[in-house]
């Protein structure tokens, strides 16, 4: 999905027709909902002088609006850079929400010194677009140079400054990389100031974006800002199979969503008894097969038996305490009756709003049958071919008699020569003589 409406040549979050589902590093990337937009400010209210500007990827920064330029969210502005020159970005947040964002990110007002120069002019936008068009080619040329030098690093993204005088190269590597020779060749090839910045695998996925296994955009590229460590114990607590192909995300690390429901599972596991692998009874040792922590049920099975016996947690704790005291109960006790709900039969006619999902298949079958009937009726049977009709249903005794008679006729027919062939042979002998 692309951005439908753009102002000043740039993609604006306010005018995007995709309703916040852009897949091109665009409009909904870490947006802040302006819940103060419909509220009237006091008459003596003085607007907050600092704004938040968003650049490519998830990069954001705060700038001082010294000239009190009227700015709205989504507009392109020209801002100051610490190394000189200027950069172009979108206004993401204005007003009192900026003050709250600064508190959230622990940024003091005195530390914000970079200024907003002006609204982006058509000349600024053209130069900014020309710089962005060079990023793809520059990234691939840099990858080739890194391969020629044998550097174990991956250039994942390139971000040009708005004035096309500086480029920031984002790369991933397992360890420290000596890229001094690479920077020399890059400076000769591109004639710009170069900055190399190492990022992690999760930050790389956040910048590039994509679709997860759930069918939605990656959390790290839409709303997730802090990356917490994810361990395999989170999968164990949730009774998930330790399959790296299923648990790993597009970054190659464990999925961040494994931590979302971990607290709920940890709270439910508090009521589940530990070390209950075997319960001793007079009938035999019952082994634990399955645990449903939310229904608070545990399934056990006796040796040489295929059936599983569900027990409540209180009964399991009671038998476990008896085993500790040396008491062996006769059996596991009362079996919990589990209500089996009948499977819902989906009415596809009402859900889909059509007659039937297989209606086309039935029509095709009828067409094939009609075609085969027409072919059989159009083709005349040859003289020597005998068309046999299917006999009516017969009793078993009559069917055996008829089968015997048919076998005799078949044997006789096999050894009787054809009269037409015999006449042809006689004619051939007379003509030969």
Image (cartoon, rainbow, N blue to C red):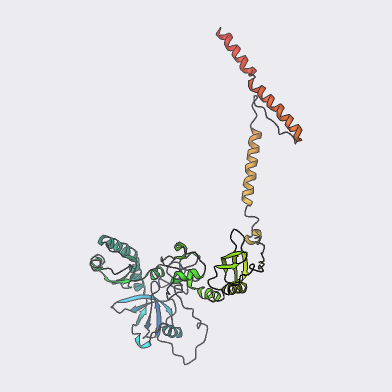
Where does residue 224 sit, x and y in percent of width and height? 45, 74
Q: In which quarter of the image is residue 158?
A: bottom left
Observer able to see residue 17: no
Q: Which of the two residues, 148 or 248, is positioned nearer the viewer here?
A: 248
Where does residue 175 sit, x and y in percent of width and height? 31, 69
Q: Which of the two residues, 384 or 22, is positioned nearer the viewer here?
A: 384
Relative to 424, 92 lies left or right: left
Which residue is at a point 62% across and 46% down the rendered structure image?
Answer: 364
Farthest residue to the top: give it.
Answer: 433
Relative to 317, 259 lies left or right: left
Q: Which of the two residues, 214 or 365, is positioned nearer the viewer here?
A: 214
Farthest residue to the front: give it.
Answer: 326
Where does residue 260 sit, x and y in percent of width and height? 50, 73
Which residue is at a point 60% across and 15% down the rendered structure image?
Answer: 424
Where does residue 359 sit, x and y in percent of width and height? 64, 52
Observer able to see residue 303: yes
Q: Quadrant of residue 80?
A: bottom left
Q: Which of the two residues, 204 or 397, is positioned nearer the viewer here?
A: 397
Above or below, 239 against 365 in this view is below
Question: For the C terminus, which image quadrant?
Answer: top right
The mark total stands at 0
């Amino acid at each position: 999905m692309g951005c439908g409406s753009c102002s000043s040549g740039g993609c604006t979050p306010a005018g995007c027709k995709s309703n916040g589902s852009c897949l091109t590093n665009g409009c909904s990337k870490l947006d802040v909902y302006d819940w103060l937009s419909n509220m009237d400010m006091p008459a003596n209210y003085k607007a907050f002088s600092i704004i938040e500007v968003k650049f490519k990827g998830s990069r954001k920064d705060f700038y001082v609006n010294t000239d009190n330029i009227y700015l709205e969210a989504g507009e392109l502005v020209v801002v100051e850079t610490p190394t000189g020159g200027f950069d172009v970005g979108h206004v993401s947040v204005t007003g009192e929400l900026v003050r709250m964002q600064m508190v959230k990110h622990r940024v003091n007002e005195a530390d914000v010194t970079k200024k907003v120069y002006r609204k982006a002019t058509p000349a600024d936008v053209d130069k900014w677009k020309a710089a962005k068009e060079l990023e793809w080619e520059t990234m691939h040329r840099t990858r080739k140079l890194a391969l020629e030098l044998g550097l174990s690093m991956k250039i994942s993204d390139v971000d040009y400054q708005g004035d096309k005088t500086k480029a920031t190269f984002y790369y991933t590597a397992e360890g420290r990389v000596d890229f001094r020779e690479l920077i020399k060749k890059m400076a000769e090839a591109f004639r710009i100031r170069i900055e190399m910045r190492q990022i992690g695998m999760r930050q790389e996925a956040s910048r590039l974006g994509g679709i997860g296994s759930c069918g939605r955009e990656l959390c790290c590229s839409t709303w997730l800002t802090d990356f917490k460590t994810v361990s395999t114990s989170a999968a164990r607590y949730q009774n998930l199979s330790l399959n790296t192909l299923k648990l790993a995300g597009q970054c190659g690390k464990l999925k961040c969503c494994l931590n979302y429901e971990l607290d709920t599972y940890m709270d439910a596991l508090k009521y589940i008894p530990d070390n209950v692998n075997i319960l001793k009874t007079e009938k035999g040792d019952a082994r634990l097969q399955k645990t449903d922590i939310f229904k608070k049920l545990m399934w056990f099975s006796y040796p040489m038996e295929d059936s599983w016996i569900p027990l409540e947690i209180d009964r399991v704790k009671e038998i476990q305490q008896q085993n500790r005291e040396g008491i062996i109960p006769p059996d596991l006790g009362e079996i919990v009756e589990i209500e089996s709900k009948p499977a819902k039969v989906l009415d596809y006619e009402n859900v889909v709003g059509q007659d039937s999902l297989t209606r086309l298949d039935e029509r095709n079958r009828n067409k094939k049958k009609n075609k085969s009937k027409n072919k059989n009726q159009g083709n005349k049977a040859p003289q020597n071919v005998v068309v046999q009709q299917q006999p009516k249903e017969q009793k078993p005794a009559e069917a055996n008699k008829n089968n015997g008679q048919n076998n005799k006729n078949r044997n006789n027919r096999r050894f009787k020569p054809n009269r037409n062939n015999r006449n042809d042979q006689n004619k051939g002998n007379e003509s030969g003589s």
